[in-house]
Image: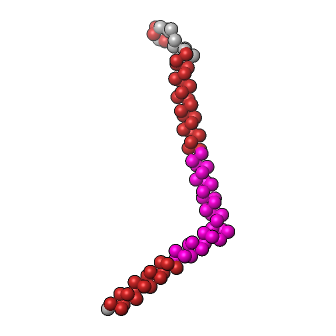
Amino acid sequence: MRRLFWLALGGTMGALVVRRLSAAAHKLTPGGIAESLSAGLSQLAEAIGDFAGDVRTAMGERERELRAGVGLDGQLGAKPEDFTA
């Protein structure tokens, strides 16, 4: 019984090692390198797009703050009755 356990354990470990080595060897082939590179570039492009969106949002908020501060929003010195329709 003990020998069967160790045989099964050794077979399982051997299969896992072979699978890991095969995956590592695939990453070193030209196709594997191209896949890794394309995945990395797509993640980089997505991160840059997210950053640009955040910058645009913050830029719009800051522009509204500045316009309100210098009176370019049409409300500096305006009376509340001027805005009733």
Question: Which residues are drawn in magenta?
Answer: 19-48
In the picture provided, is 65 more to the left or to the right than 9?
Answer: right
Outermost residue, left direction? Answer: 1
Q: Residue at x 54, y 14 (%)?
A: 71
Outermost residue, right direction? Answer: 30
Above or below: residue 73 compared with residue 58: above
Above or below: residue 31 compared with residue 37: below
Q: Residue at x 50, y 8 (%)?
A: 77
Residue 26 lies, in percent from the top left, at 60, 72
Residue 67 lies, in percent from the top left, at 55, 20
Toward the viewer: 82 or 43? 43
Above or below: residue 23 compared with residue 39: below
Q: Residue at x 54, y 24 (%)?
A: 64
Query: Would you say residue 38 sits in the magenta stretch?
Result: yes
Q: Quadrant of the N terminus?
A: bottom left
Above or below: residue 45 compared with residue 68: below
Q: Residue at x 42, y 85 (%)?
A: 10
Majority SS type along the magenta span: helix
Q: How is the image coloured?
A: secondary structure
Residue 18 lies, in percent from the top left, at 52, 79
